[in-house]
Image: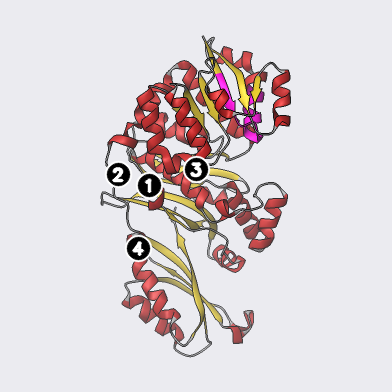
Amino acid sequence: MELRVGLLGVGTVGGGVAELLLGEGAALKERTGGIGIRLVAAADIEPKRLASLSAAGVEVSKDAMRVVSRDDVDVVVELIGGADTAKALILEALRRRRSVVTANKHLLAEHGEEIVRAARGAGAALGFSAAVCGGVPVLLALRTGLVANKIASIVGIVNGTCNYILTRMSLGGTTYAAALAEAQAQGYAEANPALDVDGHDSAHKLTILAALAFRTPVALSSVLSEGISGLDVLDLRYAQDLGYVVKLVAIGKRAGDRDALDLRVHPTLLPKEHPLAAVSGVFNAVEITGHAVGRVMLFGRGAGKEPTSSNIVADLVEIARGSAARATDQLAFWIDRPPMPILPPGEASTRFYVRFTVRDEYGVLGSMARILGEHRVSIASVIQKEPHEGDATNGVPIVVLTHAARAADFRAALDEIDACEFSIRRAVFLRIEEA
């Protein structure tokens, strides 16, 4: 048996897929029990990317739809990214009953229901293991290895760009702007990094993770998303003094005994003993808690040529073996179930870190404690910095850690404190996720 592949997009990841298929074909055939996987056609808008493939006997074109429509293509690998063009190509491939492999988390997060419906209607397989965390097989684990579990939570660092920036800020005392510039110079951040640093990329990934973990349709708009661009290195330093590390974390969990999901992406204080706290640089990690297996953590490179192409080829192997079609059938929840309710952001209950900047006056701390208490926010600890640690005319920082509080109550308390005469500037707050 032979699986014939049409590749759309021969950039960094697409080039890695081509190298694996062309260079490891014999080894893959041996590992799959005699099933060949052959790259027969490829498309890219840059002709120079196609030259080496053409020399290897692959039919090449600048027209992606031409590859999709070929009779000798069994499966289409979409790696061009974006939404509109990629969606049109994938839907056309499925209409022609071609199986599809994609790493396009943007497309799946926004149009997953439509794509799954088209795949099932065509009886075709849909593979997207590389859409979240690159080479980390977290989606495969949710679909297969953890299928016996009722998932209670999924918490992860799923964006390597942000993790690199925060690592530099935490370990090197670097400002956000300097850390971002360094990430761009290293090739870890785009020239326009908004998709990563504003939390949107992580929200796309959490949408997919939550759908698989909790077996429910999830709308991207239901995920609270906050980024790291407004972080001050001062708060990362204070967090370290208190025994915490700041990470951009994607959180999906069942909301206590309520039949609802709590879905959030935001900078988060993690205790230093938390398994995710030690994940540094461009690495990704996801911790999954199931009722039978307990806590499981998957760790690895979340992006890049080799890790991502590894998961794409793994999807091709699943399709070649026939198991991918059964896996696609398991995605029926995406189209035939009403979605689970999503907890409104104000209803989520967490602990908080908050830094106030206030006048150095008698009774300020007591007034703040009173206002917090009136809004049902309980203080766990307080650190008031000495005036000489900063210019007292610019205010004295007071750092407060709270016990778990409802977000709406906490924000109401902050608004009242910010309006007080002793408050010099608006409070800065971050959520805390315990181990």
In primary-sequence order, the first of circles 3 and 1 is: 3
Give the label on residue 153, or none.
none
Give neighbour class at mark 2: few <14, some 14-19, many 20+ (Cα, 10 Å).
some
Which residue matches tag 3? Answer: 106
Q: Is residue 272 visible?
A: no
Which residue matches tag 2? Answer: 339
Query: Percent position (x, y) of residue 285?
Result: 52, 43
In primary-sequence order, the first of circles 3 and 4 is: 3
Which residue matches tag 1? Answer: 219
**Magenta stretch encompasses residue 354:** no
**Magenta stretch encompasses residue 15:** yes
Q: Are marks 4 and 2 in contact (CB under 8 Å)?
A: no
Depth-wise, is mark 4 or mark 2 nearer the camera? Answer: 2
Give the structural element (helix, strand or loop) at label 3: helix
Q: Are marks 2 and 1 in contact (CB under 8 Å)?
A: yes
Depth-wise, is mark 3 or mark 4 nearer the camera? Answer: 3
At 43% from the left and 85% from the top, the residue drawn is 420
On screen, residue 161 versus residue 139, left or right, reads right
- Looking at the picture, which amino acid does disc 1 mark? Ala
Distance in Å between CA atoms under marks 1 and 4:
18 Å
- Find the magenta span and give its range: 5-20
Q: Are marks 3 and 1 in contact (CB under 8 Å)?
A: no
